[in-house]
Image: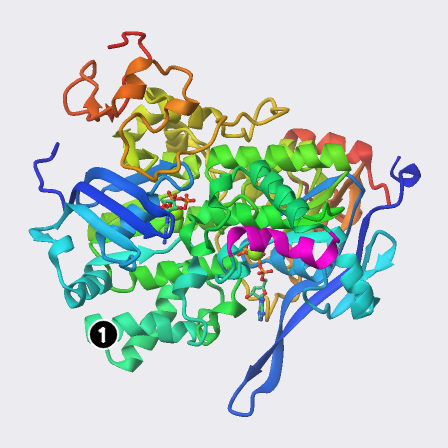
Amino acid sequence: MADGAAPVLDVRGLTTVFHTRQGEIHAVNSVSFSLKRGEVLGVVGESGSGKSVTMMSLVGLLPAPPAEVRAGEVLLGTSDLLKMNAQGLSDVRGAKVGFVFQDPMTSLNPVFTVENQICEPLIRHLGMTKQQARARAVELLDLVGIPDAAKRVKSYPHQFSGGMRQRVMIAIALACEPDILIADEPTTALDVTIQAQILELMKDLRQKLGMAIIWITHDLGVIAGIADRVMVMYGGQVVEHAPVGEIFHNPQHPYTRALLRTIPKITGQREKRLSVIEGQPPIMTDAPRACAFRARCAHRFDRCEAENPLRRTLDSLPLGIGHDVACHWSPEGADA
Amino acid sequence: MRDTSPPALVQVDGLKMYFPIHSGVLRRHTGDVKAVDDVSFSINAGETLGLVGESGCGKSTVGRALLRLYEPTAGRVIIDGEDIAQLSSEALRKKRPTMQMVFQDPQASLNPRMSLSSIIGEPLVEHTPMTAAERQGRIYELMDQVGLNRRFANRFPHEFSGGQRQRIGIARALALNPKFIVCDEPIAALDVSIQAQVVNLLEDLQEKFGLTYLFISHDLSMVRHIADRVAVMYLGRIVELSPRDDLYARPLHPYAEALLSAVNEPDPDRAKTRKRILLKGDLPSPANPPKGCNFCTRCPKVFARCLTEKPDLVHVEYGRQVACHLFDPINTASGSTGGSEDQEHLQHGVTQ
Ligand SMILES: Nc1ncnc2c1ncn2[C@@H]1O[C@H](COP(=O)(O)OP(=O)(O)OP(=O)(O)O)[C@@H](O)[C@H]1O
Ligand SMILES: Nc1ncnc2c1ncn2[C@@H]1O[C@H](COP(=O)(O)OP(=O)(O)OP(=O)(O)O)[C@@H](O)[C@H]1O
Ligand SMILES: [Mg+2]
Ligand SMILES: [Mg+2]
């Protein structure tokens, strides 16, 4: 670590499969990464590439069965979350790790008011009285920009718009001021001005509390604005991982490069047709034995078929930049 | 030119959608959330109208009221010559196949107990005489179109990722070859490549079948790509409605200006240096909107008249409508947005 600090979260070799009627789905294959205090790790990648499943595996949020976390270590401080019992995990989730889910309706309970749902962790984990918790709930809603918070706090989730529900989720996740916030597409339903406000709020919290953030998003604009490092996933694996500037200015993996080409522009010439990554994503019915991206890759060669590339560090860069990529090909043309 | 063009496919006049607020033990009706408050616009056949604006400003509600998924509080919605609000339930059922919606919240709109192929096939069963084999063929075709692997046909919604679920919803909306589709954040949950794929698909279908879209989205660069004209909403009202290129080159309404300035560009260096117009001030509640302009509590260009009088949406230059007192002839002397362009405003004058 550059600043010598131990990571707050260290994930090694995480592997998760689903058991389905059609056999196994290898959703997450030996994923490793770490997170330092106050750091923002952006996670991008194809839909279905295992971003959500990775993060849910960390804190025991997947129903087992059908899910099975087959291998790996998830070190939060010194304790391995994968070895923890249900009670321990539930305490971790409430107080140390906040989670904003991709789909707010699945995690908000439709029969309880928003107030109820924000107060619950405050009472349970921070030992607040009902009254304190209620006041704090209004504060939190206000913080995430819900107008007229004192009144709206009594509403039920269905009475909120999509973006408002998402902000309620964020308020719940932040309620106990966790060390780590895992935010899965937290701002997809928000317009850009409120998005900007939430981004500022997050930056603020990380400054004040040293909160570390894992931010999953498809929005590369948000990544550019908030992330320190970026992890790119494809087919259940990490295919590239680097500081944010490196990802945008020196992308190595053909998937990352293609991804950056597909973004429509807000200024300049308007493209007639958007460029896409041709072909279909892998089905992941087996553990990967070859490169998962090979079928769609313009640079593939024999080795990609024969061997799943491991993550290798770019040694052309100064030490400590920490840019790694899982690909046999390299843009410099120096094919191994 | 507008006058000689064919009649609009969708014509919305004075649409209002209020949700009653009940409070106290007696659940008395104590007020209304004015989710949509007097909105009018039209969409021509084969056109895409983008609808953007702050979260909670009423975009989804407009979309739902248009397809009569809500009973509007007031106003007329004419689609293809028929007033949707007046249709009997049988007539509405017959009309349904021609107008579809892709929902913002894919989880909530997919039946968890149905497999993917029965979800996509359901409208085919209900509205077409297809045989099982024809249906299966059509289901596969739709799955190909939205980029879902055919081998997923027998899986259930919970076995898919967020983006995959969104594509199921799109495939189902397309099943009956509708004429008009309300796309409510159809791509928010998708990765950029699939976003591009879906948007290209929507454009192809539009070209082939002359489809008409209302495209609700927070993604302003995607709206720039797909929309012909764009309506910007704020707190239940349309504040600007302009052709795409005009809006992006030179937004007129101060809210539209702030919104466009806040777009995140995918470039970490520019993200550090760019200038945003940060909106300060209270965000009013739709249950209790300000007396004057709805944006007056946060508008950087607010002046006295804004606090007392609601601006109407009026034509200010060719093809552009704005609801802002700055553009009212009485005030053209006192102010206008964007320095160098002022001259042009005055030249175009007021066309209404
Ligand atoms: N309960 C389940 N049973 C079987 N397969 C599942 C289940 N949940 C997820 N999967 C599969 O695991 C893979 C990874 O899903 P995940 O939700 O992590 O994707 P993601 O990267 O978050 O995608 P998105 O960007 O679309 O949200 C997908 O291919 C999905 O189909
Ligand atoms: N069923 C309902 N009952 C009460 N209020 C509602 C209901 N549905 C929506 N609202 C309110 O109406 C307003 C507009 O909601 P709507 O869902 O149309 O917003 P939106 O523009 O689509 O926002 P977003 O971008 O966040 O999806 C919000 O204040 C919301 O709380
Ligand atoms: Mg996901
Ligand atoms: Mg909405």
Which residue is pictured at 54% across the width and 41% down the height? B219
Q: Quadrant where the N terminus of chain B lies?
A: top right
Q: Regarding ligand 2, which quadrant of the image does it lie in?
A: bottom right
Residue nearest the viewer, comparing A309 with B203: A309
Quarter of the figure with residue A231: top left
Q: Is residue B79 magenta?
A: no
Q: Would you say residue B232 is visible in this rendering?
A: no
Which residue is pictured at 52% across the width and 51% down the height? B116
Chain letter of mark 1 equals A
**Residue B274 placement (x, y as % from top left):** 44, 32
Instruction: From the image, tell me which residue sits under label 1.
Output: A124
Which residue is pictured at 73% across the width and 56% down the height? B127
Question: In the drawing, does residue B122 fall left or right of residue B190?
Answer: right
Magenta segment, principal secondary structure? helix
Question: In the drawing, does residue B230 fall left or right of residue B86?
Answer: left
Q: Is residue B124 magenta?
A: yes
**Residue B256 placement (x, y as % from top left):** 61, 44
**Residue B61 placement (x, y as % from top left):** 64, 61
Q: Which residues are magenta?
A: B115-129
Q: Quadrant where the C terminus of chain B lies?
A: top right
* Amino acid type of the residue tagged 1 in the rendering: Arg
**Residue A317 placement (x, y as % from top left):** 20, 17
